[in-house]
Image (tube, rainbow, N blue to C red):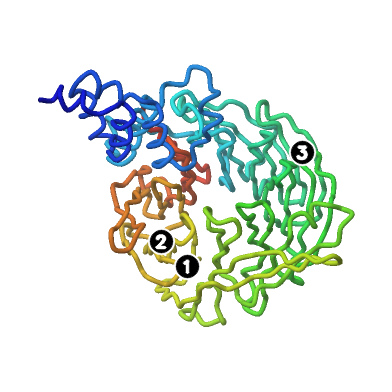
């Protein structure tokens, strides 16, 4: 009877029917008979499921990688990895390594080479770089837990960022010196004396893949430098005499957001990136119609959608507003425009810094003390969690999971799910522990790629440590 059904449908019809199946059902169908097996092995079906499940897949890169498994093989191995990241069993799913060597506070760390999910995820070797007040940068192979190189000792570092396109690390120190370093060797490339005792760094690549460094100064100015040469491109006033401590770039690479969190009377500004990255042009910018910026984030699936939490100065009276940024161009001028698409009140219960992240085009996450809240941009509270005993210090968000870091010396892993009623929601999964409270004050930051998690631990002896959790394939 099964053979009669198999033979009654042409191959094209079978493939069309199988396109409606999930992966488990497709695997079951493939063992019914030879014809069904042949149809179920069609690469188009597995390619389609890969692109539906992992929207970040770069098709051209995947197809060009030598030695890449079939689309079916990619789907199965990728699913296997995600199952491990979802269950988090320490002996079976991941390994944890302590990265020690810094003799001071870790002021920043980032993936220089990570598994971004766009290539063969089981051959990538993630490399993380960290900067410390001990005046050194260190590069780490987090799978092996070894230090690849260490920079020469210099003045205490106070911030760092990376340009993954050019494999460059950028640091600023306590005397206002900004330097670039080669990611492969740690060799110094360029040096620029900013004169800023404190600064905020943002590496930025425009639509032409030219790289720049945005520097927010303690005096409220935005300085734009070329990368990796660190030659000055332009300089702009954002706010007078207040630290410019919040810099963001839009997914479409057309906008730079700049704000100070130090004064409730100041308005954030949005710069058109082409104008500040071109020394021959006047800056094109607009002020957002809000004051008292506390936190901000661009929503990753929209070209230029920005969420901002702002306040009138009262602790509990905070508002989350969402703006879509566009450019109106005429023959003689360009005029940026910020259209407000949503606004709602957020009730905060703690006085610690608010942390704001986003997923997709309409979901925002807010960390308030030890609470994690998930909202739609229309103000609907989708989920709320209180998994930590002490305040959340950092969030890491991707298309599969959310990781929260806390002063209670634990990381909490949550995974996204589709709720029939509310759309995207989160499901709390498990804790990753970071050691002993007798030796540390808890986690201070966290970063992730698609197969690992790295977090910094503030040590009581002043020698901070990185914890690397690598999930096995």
Name the front one of labels 3 and 2.
3
Give the x, y percent position of residue 166. Answer: 69, 34
Residue designated by label 1: 352
- Please, what secondary structure does the residue beneath circle 2 have? loop
Is 188 situated left or right of 417 in this image? Answer: right
Horizontal and vertical percent position of residue 183: 66, 31
Q: Is residue 207 above or below residue 356?
A: above
Count how many numbered circles sit on residues in the image: 3
Residue located 37% across and 24% down the image: 73
Dot label at residue 81: none
Query: What residue sits right under mark 2 in the picture?
Result: 391
Please tell me which residue lies in front, 256 or 39: 39
N-term-proximal mark, 2 vs 1: 1
Q: Residues within 10 Å of mark 3 (few under 14, many from 20)?
A: many
- Mark 1 / mark 3, whichever is N-terminal: 3
Q: Which residue lies furthest to the right in this view?
A: 280
Report which residue position mark 3 lands on: 228
- Residue 256 seen from this side: yes
Q: Nearer the viewer, residue 457 or 179?
A: 179
Q: Can residue 95 be seen in this view?
A: no
């Amino acid at each position: 009877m099964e053979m009669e059904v198999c033979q009654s449908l042409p191959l094209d019809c079978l493939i069309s029917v199988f396109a409606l199946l999930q992966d488990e059902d497709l695997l079951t169908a493939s063992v019914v008979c030879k014809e069904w097996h042949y149809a179920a092995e069609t690469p188009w079906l597995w390619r389609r499921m890969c692109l539906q499940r992992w929207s970040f897949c770069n098709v051209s890169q995947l197809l060009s990688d030598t030695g890449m498994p079939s689309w079916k093989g990619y789907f199965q191995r990728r699913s296997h990895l995600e199952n491990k990241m979802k269950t988090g069993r320490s002996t079976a799913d991941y390994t944890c390594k302590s990265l020690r060597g810094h003799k001071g506070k870790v002021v920043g760390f980032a993936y220089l080479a990570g598994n971004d999910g766009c290539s063969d995820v089981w051959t990538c070797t993630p490399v993380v770089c960290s900067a410390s007040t001990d005046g050194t940068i260190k590069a780490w192979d987090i799978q092996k837990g070894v230090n690849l190189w260490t920079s020469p000792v210099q003045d205490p570092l106070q911030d760092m960022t990376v340009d993954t396109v050019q494999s460059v690390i950028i640091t600023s120190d306590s005397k206002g010196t900004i330097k670039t370093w080669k990611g492969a060797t740690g060799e110094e490339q360029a040096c620029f004396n900013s004169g800023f005792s404190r600064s905020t760094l943002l590496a930025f690549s425009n639509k032409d893949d030219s790289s720049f460094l945005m520097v927010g100064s303690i005096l409220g100015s935005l300085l734009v430098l070329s990368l990796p040469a660190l030659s000055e491109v332009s300089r702009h006033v954002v706010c007078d005499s207040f630290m410019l401590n919040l810099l963001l770039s839009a997914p479409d690479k057309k906008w730079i957001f700049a704000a100070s969190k130090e004064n409730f009377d100041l308005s954030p500004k949005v710069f058109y990136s082409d104008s500040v990255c071109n020394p021959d042009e006047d800056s094109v910018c607009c002020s957002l119609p809000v004051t008292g910026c506390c936190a901000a984030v661009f929503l990753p699936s929209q070209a230029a959608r920005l969420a901002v939490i702002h306040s009138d100065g009262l602790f509990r009276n905070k508002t989350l507003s969402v703006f879509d940024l566009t450019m109106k161009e005429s023959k003689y001028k360009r005029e940026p425009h910020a259209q407000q698409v949503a606004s709602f009140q957020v009730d905060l219960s703690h006085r610690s810094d608010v942390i704001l992240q986003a997923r997709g085009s309409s979901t925002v996450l807010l960390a308030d003390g030890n609470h994690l809240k998930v909202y739609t941009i229309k103000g609907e509270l989708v989920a709320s969690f209180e998994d930590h005993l002490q305040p959340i210090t950092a969030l890491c968000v991707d298309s599969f999971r959310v990781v929260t870091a806390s002063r209670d010396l634990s990381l909490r892993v949550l995974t996204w799910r589709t709720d029939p009623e509310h759309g995207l929601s989160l499901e709390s999964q498990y804790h990753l522990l970071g050691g002993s409270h007798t030796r540390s004050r808890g986690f201070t930051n966290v970063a992730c790629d698609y197969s690992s998690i790295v977090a910094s631990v503030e040590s009581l002896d002043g020698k901070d440590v990185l914890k690397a959790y690598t999930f096995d394939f």
